[in-house]
Image (cartoon, helix red, strand yellow):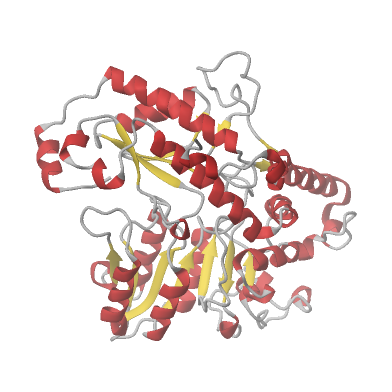
Amino acid sequence: MTSPAEKFKLAPSDDPLTKFRDEFVVPTFRQMKATAVSAEIADKPCTYLCGNSLGLLPKRAKKLVEEELEVWGTRAVEGHFDHPHGRSWMYIADYVHPHFANLVGAIESEVACMGTLTANLHLMLNAFYKPTQERYKILCEARAFPSDQYAFATSVSARGYDPDDAVIALSPRSGEHILRTEDILDTIRREGSSIALVLFAGVQFYTGQFFAIQEITAAARAQGCKCGWDLAHAVGNVPLSLHDWDVDFAVWCTYKYLNSGPGGIGGLFVHSRWADLPIQEAGWWGHNPATRFDMPARFHAIRGAQGFQQSNPSVLATVSLLGSLEVFAAAGGMQALRARSERLTGYLEALLRQSRFYAAPGEAFEKPQRERVRVTIITPENVEERGAQLSLVFLPTGRGVMPRVLKGLEARGVVGDSRKPDVIRLAPAPLYNTFEDVERAVVILDEVLAEVDKEGVPPASEEERVDKEDVVDG
């Protein structure tokens, strides 16, 4: 009899995208310092499920960076205009823009390859957050990534408002981990006349929830609010149609699913209806390229998103990204990758559910379960509400189970990442992960949980016991 998990797994002959794994450098178990693996596999590729934090090195990116170093060494400043590979540095970002447009569902003039995530977010806040006495609030999620929270707080403070009043931070309902779309929409309807800007993450970094971007954007705009999105965990992970969804603006980094390398160059989107929006922080690179090197005294912005460019982009960072984007294009883009991603993540979820240590989310935090070593999933079960990432909570919460599990996984060469106090995130990236990666991760996780269970966990303190009587929190 076929297990529920088997329906997700593809045979190699039915999985043409598996060949793109060879486009990436996968560290070996030895290189990742996996101390609890046999000598026979020490030099084999490790089980890397951490592309939601840092994507692997594309071989094409390595080649392009090496080529640019050679051009720097042999052509020096002439590389800006006379480039042996036809990638003049003067226009290096323009090689990325068509790829960005395809990935986020935009017109090419609506995207820009520039800056970093938070710097771009501040630019967009300065351009779109225009508070008035009646409409001055920002609606966001309570568990937004810290840099977003800092940006919101400093933006409202700079305009003379108290963040405690001006930032509406939504939390999930008691006993739940994800924000219900209906609660977001209700808040927009109820508070819309006072909200200047709605800004959420496309995919929530902690839970992996894929927000209903089109529906939330439409609700915000219907109330006269601007609507922007932080797509750090969404770009290259889920299909996007920012232009058609009528999003005002969006920002993203590229070192996660887009595999551009640590601290890689960022990106932004500005809808074409804002193509002539006044730019407050003008920079040389946002000036019309036809007269940029004439050095005119008056700024003449490029129409659209690229007018927000400030400095010439890092060529090395840009071609590192370009190498990865070429692989995305060769693989058929996001629609093809999304289909494979749903299978990989579905397979991971189904195998986890078969584990003897698995507790269904509705049961996981009930009193009989709390003192037993268990794992549950807080990422939405509905595939339309998640990307590649599954966020696992380890029970009993607050008792040091997760760090021990993480250490056991690392020793066996299963690479995920953690969020304190109790979450490990695993993300099978469809460009380079395999069904065998998923299988091994779950087998090893079961092995580690068995060890932790055998060793036992310390008893809860009196304070923890009292807290857990009424609070259900992963």
- Is residue 473 visible in the rendered image? The answer is yes
**Quadrant, the C terminus:** top left
Considering depth in this image, is 387 or 63 the residue closer to the camera?
Answer: 387
Q: Position of residue 247 (x, y in %)?
A: 51, 76
- Is residue 255 visible in the rendered image? The answer is no
Residue shown at the point (26%, 80%) measured from the top left = 190
Considering depth in this image, is 75 or 399 the residue closer to the camera?
Answer: 399
In this view, 203 is above or below 369: below
Badge count = 0
In this view, 235 is above or below 262: below
Task: Answer left or right for 39 relative to 407.
Answer: right
The image quarter in which residue 164 lies: bottom left
Residue reaching furthest top? 39
Task: Answer left or right for 95 relative to 225.
Answer: right
Q: Position of residue 451 (x, y in %)?
A: 35, 20
Considering depth in this image, is 61 or 380 the residue closer to the camera?
Answer: 380
Q: Position of residue 456 (x, y in %)?
A: 25, 21
Residue shown at the point (47%, 60%) measured from the top left = 384
Q: Position of residue 31 (x, y in %)?
A: 61, 25
In this view, 277 is above or below 159: below
Task: Answer left or right for 212 relative to 94.
Answer: left
Residue reaching furthest front? 1
